[in-house]
Image (cartoon, rainbow, N blue to C red):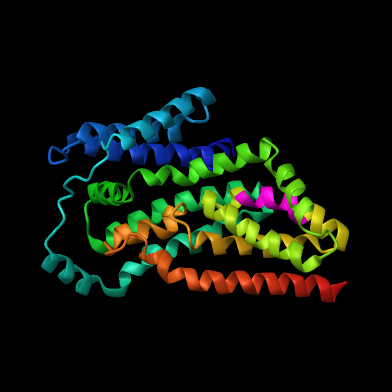
Amino acid sequence: MRLFDLLFTLEAVFVLSGVSLGAIAVQSFADRSNPSRAGTGAFWLLLAVTFAGGSHMPSWLTGLLVLAMVAIDAAGHVRHGNYGEPAASERAAAARRIGNRILVPVLMIPLLTYGASVALAPLELDANRVVYASLGYASIIAAVVALLVTRARPVDVVTEGRRLSDAIGAIVILPQLLASLGAVFKAAGVGDVIASGVAAIVPADNLFLVVVVCCTGIAAFTFLLGNSFAAFPLVMAGVGVPMIVVPFGADPALVGLMVITAASCGTLCTPMAANFNIVPAALFEMRSTYGVIRFQAPFAAAMLVAHIVLLWAFIALGR
């Protein structure tokens, strides 16, 4: 049981992630075709250290490593290298040979994660620990299955991982930075500032206007922060709870659900949500970096209007 407690933790997954990033760093240092192999390798090595040893390092040291990564990227030293990709004809032939079997490892990740969560439910472990640890180990199993399906070499997992990591670039650390920024904002009392500002402008007894401010506010904060989970506590603490839940007797679960999904309207339109909106454009080599955002923006606007109307109607008609 002690071995299970040691391995089935989020920290264990972080260590494995650090090992993977360390392997990418080694390949980057060895890639003589990369005009900045030292800088690229150093960036991925520093990121590997923060993942593998972050729980045991003082926060000031982790902060210095992050600043070093930012400096390396700002100086233009994170670049693409040579990944030994086969010719287009060989890739097409492999795609025809494998067919839809390539989806097997992809579908295994959510299925194994869900299965592990259900199987471990009787142990009454922390839900976040179960989900994230299961996701990490499911990804490892899926990688092994992918090797069997494609008949690739184990080193190809690292090589393809490096190719994707280099394609994403330094924005791979953006989610962590934005989540930290949200925590800083909350600790600094930004939610209280929002509440006082909204109360001074919007009539507190006008449910519709308060709902408009709440939904558009979280969409705007998500646009700026690129992370709805960073914006959510700020808006709920500043507007959702004191101006909707308490005075109008609204169901907190209903308000929280509508507000967190309204945040996606900002996610769909911001380059700060790089993993959703910028990375796909880079991976698929789209002509426009912001092509995904341009396509999603009209849907985001329609969704925001729908959230405002629905949240207002649910509260007004349910009173």
Q: Is residue 75 left or right of residue 18?
A: left
Number of numbered labels in the structure image: 0
Q: What residue appears at the point 22 percent right and 60 percent down from the top-left corner?
A: 151
Q: Is residue 136 left or right of residue 72?
A: right
Location of residue 293 with respect to 185 vertically, above or below: below
Residue appearing at x 45%, y 45% in the figure: 174
Q: Quadrant of the C terminus?
A: bottom right
Q: Residue 181's spot in the image, x, y percent?
A: 56, 40
In this view, the residue in front, 40 or 77, is 77
The percent position of residue 141, horizontal first and vertical second, equals 40, 54
**Which of the pair 259/220 is nearer the observer?**
220
Q: Which residues are magenta?
A: 231-240
* Residue 239 falls within the magenta-colored stretch: yes
Report whether residue 14 is seen: yes
Confirm whether the magenta stretch covers residue 217: no
Secondary structure, magenta segment, majority class:
helix
In the picture, which quadrant includes the N terminus?
Answer: top right
Question: Quick check: 318 above or below 258?
Answer: below
Is 144 on the left or on the right of 80, as rendered? right
What residue is at 35 percent from the left and 39 percent from the top?
Answer: 21
Nearer to me, 190 or 135 = 190
Residue 157 percent location from the top left of the image: 28, 50
User: Can residue 9 be seen at all in this image of the molecule?
Assistant: no
For the point 13% across and 59% down, which residue is it?
Answer: 86
Q: Is residue 50 left or right of residue 197?
A: left
User: What percent of the width, then of the height, locates residue 83?
Assistant: 18, 49
